[in-house]
Image (cartoon, rainbow, N blue to C red):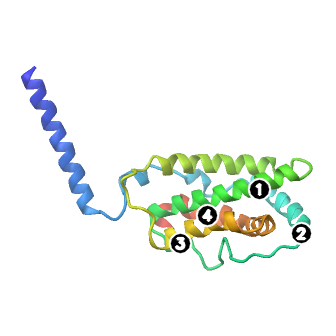
Amino acid sequence: MELELVGSCTWVLVLVAAGLSLASASPSKPTAAWTACDFGRFKSLSPRELEAFKKARDALENSLKSWSCTTRPFPRNRDLRQLQVWERPVALEAELALTLKVLGTMADASQGGILDQPLHTLHHMHSELQACVSAQPTAGPQPQGRLHHWLHRLHEASRKESQGCLEASVLFNLFRLLKKDLECVASGDLCV
């Protein structure tokens, strides 16, 4: 019993020491846990999925009423490559959450199921991202700098902007999200 307890204590000390050395090596960002999230399957969508998104976008763009925005929820100059690799899934998860909220409202208001397939695909992507982001260490850094600004802008847009502005912004950003942002997160360190 005593030998077993000593062996257990030794392993605890080894694990604590390893954890401390990892923490001191990179205090500014989580590392090992973020590489466990595999988004490779989202690097590119199937032609059928892309076609469903294109049909939905085209149909909904034609139905947009006049709109104006006081801010740009998705500014043209923003680029996920400007963020650290560990921040990208966090930003994309927030972007997908807003997109799903807005498209869900549009689907409820529209006739037919033009958004059924795109919403299904986006929900699947969002749940994968959400599981990865929520599985990350909570003691990690709080969003700062560009990531904080980005998250704040999305949050404020959903509170302050008109539904017309949000709809137009989401539709105009949709293919950037699907092709550029999702591919960047899926590529991890290779997205430079």
For this orientation, the residue located farthest to the left is: 2
Q: Which mark is residue 191?
A: none
Q: What's under tag 4, amino acid-wise?
A: His
Tag 4–tag 2 contact (CB < 8 Å): no
- In the rendered image, which residue does mark 2 sit on? 65
Q: Secondary structure at mark 3?
A: helix
Q: What's under tag 3, amino acid-wise?
A: His
The residue located at (12%, 25%) in the rendering is: 4
- In the rendered image, which residue does mark 3 sit on? 149
Tag 3–tag 4 contact (CB < 8 Å): no
Chain-order first, disc 3 or disc 4? 3
Name the foreground residue: 179 vs 63: 63
Closer to the eye: label 1 or 3: 3
Closer to the eye: label 4 or 2: 4
For this orientation, the residue located farthest to the top is: 1
Q: Position of residue 138 (x, y in %)?
A: 40, 51
- In the rendered image, which residue does mark 4 sit on? 155
Q: Secondary structure at mark 2?
A: loop
Question: Can you tell which quarter of the image residue 103 is in?
Answer: bottom right
The residue located at (78%, 57%) in the rendering is: 53
Label 4: how many Cα within 10 Å (few below 14, some 14–19, many 20+): some
Closer to the eye: label 4 or 1: 4
Q: CA distance from mark 1 to mark 3?
A: 23 Å
Chain-order first, disc 1 or disc 2? 2
**Quadrant position of the N terminus in the picture:** top left
128 relative to 159, above or below: above
Chain-order first, disc 2 or disc 3? 2
The residue located at (61%, 64%) in the rendering is: 155
- In the rendered image, which residue does mark 1 sit on? 103
Question: Can you tell which quarter of the image residue 3 is in?
Answer: top left
Q: What's under tag 2, amino acid-wise?
A: Lys
Tag 4–tag 1 contact (CB < 8 Å): no
